[in-house]
Amino acid sequence: LLRDTDSMSMAHSLEVRPPLLDIAIVRTVLSLPNDWKQDGKTPKALLVEAVGDLPSPIVFRRKTTFTFPWAIWLRGALRPMTERALMTLPDFISNLRPERVRAVWQNFRDGKTSWSRVWALAVLSFWLQENEVTRR
């Protein structure tokens, strides 16, 4: 998540600093006695106390993951760029025969495979083009 946030913010000339990773906060919290940080009942007790009265559903909710909506983007705004990248992958790389690449793309479009397989192939294509890798 930090890597994604950093990449996305830098791509748009933004400086994003996750507040709980600020060095002053980290140093302060590390200097506090452990019993101030944990009460045995409330997750992140010190944080909960610091931000004030939070509703119980917020304090005790399960952790959730965050992933950028790559599948939506690859089927939408990034589709033309992704298709071009996949169709220009060189066939001299083992197991990257055009029919296999097309099958991965079709399986993704049909919901049978993860966006990550398509994105990995697209990134490989971008890298090969950027670095002018050709058959020897």
Image: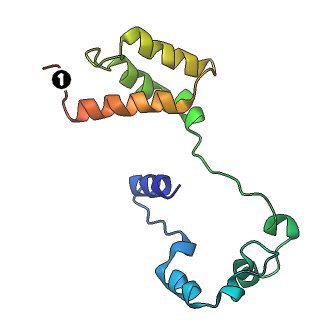
At 19% from the left edge and 28% from the top edge, which residue is drawn? 133
At 39% from the left edge and 21% from the top edge, which residue is drawn? 86
**Image position of 87 with respect to 132: above or below:** above
The image shows residue 34 at horizontal and vertical percentages of 66, 86
Q: Which residue is mark 1?
A: 134
Residue 77 seen: no
- Disc 1 crowd rating (10 Å Cα; few below 14, some 14-19, many 20+) is few
- Please, what is the three-letter code of the amino acid marked with disc 1? Thr
Tell me how many marks there are: 1
At 48% from the left edge and 65% from the top edge, which residue is drawn? 16
Asked if residue 132 lies left or right of residue 52, the reply is left
**Image position of 9 with respect to 37: above or below:** above
In this view, the residue farthest toward the left is 136
In this view, the residue farthest toward the top is 99
The quadrant in which residue 108 appears is: top right
Query: Which quadrant would the C terminus be assigned to in this image?
Result: top left
The image shows residue 66 at horizontal and vertical percentages of 62, 51
Foreground residue, 41 or 128?
41
Q: Secondary structure at mark 1?
A: loop
The image shows residue 70 at horizontal and vertical percentages of 55, 37
Asked if residue 107 lies left or right of residue 135, the reply is right
The quadrant in which residue 56 appears is: bottom right
Asked if residue 29 lies left or right of residue 100, the reply is right
At 43% from the left edge and 16% from the top edge, which residue is drawn? 101
Foreground residue, 13 or 31?
31
The image shows residue 69 at horizontal and vertical percentages of 59, 41
Residue 121 seen: yes
